[in-house]
Amino acid sequence: PLDISKNDVKLQNTFHCSALVLRAVFDVVQYKTELFVGWEDWDFWVNFHRQIGIQALYVQEALFIYTLKSVATMKSFCADYQNLCGQVFRLFNPESYTHSDVLTAIHYLLSKDVSSARNDNKEEAMVLKLVQHGSWKQLERSLPKVNALVMLALVNIARGDNTTAADLVMKALHTTNEKEDCDRIPMIHHLLELLDIRIPLNSIARCGATDHCAAVLTTVKDYLLTNTYQGRNSFDGQLFHQAISLEPHNIGWLKLFLHSISSIIYHHPESLVVLHAFNVEKIKDYISHLKSEFHHNILVVPLCTSYYANLHGFYGSFNKFQKMALGRPYYYSHVTDLFRLLVLYTFGGRYLDTDIVLRRPLSSEMSLFALSIQTEKKGYFFGHPMLNGAFLAAPPSSPFLRALILQIPDIYDPAVWAVIGPDILTNALARQSLPEVSQYPKVLPANTFYKYSWFAKDVKEFSQQEVSQELYDQEMVTGVYGYHFWSKVIFKSGHEEASFAKNSMAYRVLKDTCFTKSENFCLVH
């Protein structure tokens, strides 16, 4: 079992099934029987900790033998559909999670096409079962007024009744209370765009949604002009961006995220790292685990995707993209793909995915206008190797980025994961025929960030094969600047944390970038 004092029970199931609990606790705390997708034990622990507070005593010896004769159906389901189970779990525990967590869960579940759910699609079938179970009615009673209005709007969008949905969204907008409801504003704004309701941006300024984005614009641009932030004037003008469009799926993702930020600041101590987050307060809480000397390099800001699109005249392209993408399997991945183009067009700088960990400082040529090959294999696009935007550097107002953004509505396919990521970048660099574009980014070799691919053989070599310190050091001679950890592969299918063999390549770079206050928030100790 994990130490409850060092791990957040809301992020992972901290207790093993062997735990003993006083019978009297069940007079106060119950698990939800309607949580039939699984994880009822986790539901019990979360509510136990919220209502009473858990003080655990760990017995350092084996007291019984646990025999598993067969894998339970629901256990197997949640192992295969961890994201769905996680969203359902938040849905049934709104008092333990933020409003944005709950709304994201509702949004995710209603994005599933349950009207034609097939028996062979376990995920759609499970969501249909939830809807038929009447879970929404219970949730409506447990949520504050504005949350309930937004939830009902989402339900009506799922039913195809956009007229009723529009009325509910506008009512939610006018009902917001500045002190209590401002964290619902991004979702309300998102729904307004989805329903193609155009309102002046200052209509939502009273809750700071627009004001916050304008403030971000001012703060970052002042930094670029003066190289100062929070009173410091020693910054070197190097600007990094990372985007967090979803809450962490597990504690392993959170720890890898902290390694990624640490590696940027460690190798670029005079840089500013801007974290663009859907939930600003939660990300601020996460980075509080970093050592204090790292904090002055970090600025956490709202994820102002629509604001930046509107600011530069991309609203039409963004709105078309939203309508096609919303509710589809790769929505959040595609939103992040679009956001990196928008944020670099707005500010310039360097964008890195949150699962890239740097090994050394980026060179000057990588700080201006560059991206990297993902695989050297030819033939991906007319003989051109595949490119990846997990690392992307560009100047502000780049015609290249503008052309890509304007192209998205015409080439977008919501069923293709790579469509506005590797595909659009590879296509553009291979053809080099974008309108009004004379300068294209420098293409870096695959070793720069992608020496180890997401294929099982490479993942195993990277994370499980022991290497000497000499071989580890030689990696940089081959042009390695960092490693893409492919978090969706590393933390696959319900695994809360990945296992890294001691002195493997992955272990060594994680060991070198452990800068948290407690080693418990590093992936390796």
Image (tube, rainbow, N blue to C red):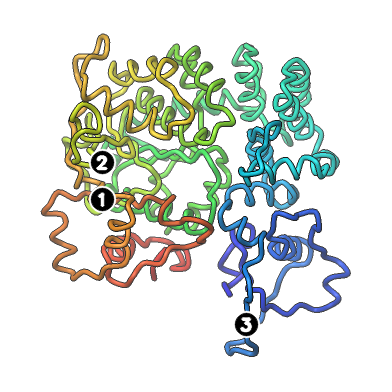
Q: Amino acid at mark 2?
A: Gln
Q: Earlier in the sequence, mark 2 or mark 3?
A: 3
Question: Does the CB distance between marks 2 and 3 fall below 8 Å?
Answer: no
* Label 3 crowd (10 A; few <14 / some 14-19 / many >=20): few
In percent of width and height, residue 303 lies at 51, 32
- Residue placed under numbered mark 3 in the picture: 58
- Secondary structure type for disc 2: strand
Q: Alpha carbon of mark 1 to alpha carbon of mark 3: how far?
A: 39 Å
- Residue placed under numbered mark 1 in the picture: 482
Quadrant of image for the C terminus: bottom left
- Residue placed under numbered mark 2 in the picture: 374
Residue 68's place in the image compared with 516, above or below, is below
Residue at horizontal 40 percent and vertical 46 percent from the top: 354
Question: Does the CB distance between marks 2 and 1 fall below 8 Å?
Answer: no
* Label 1 crowd (10 A; few <14 / some 14-19 / many >=20): many
Q: Amino acid at mark 3?
A: Tyr
What is the count of numbered marks? 3
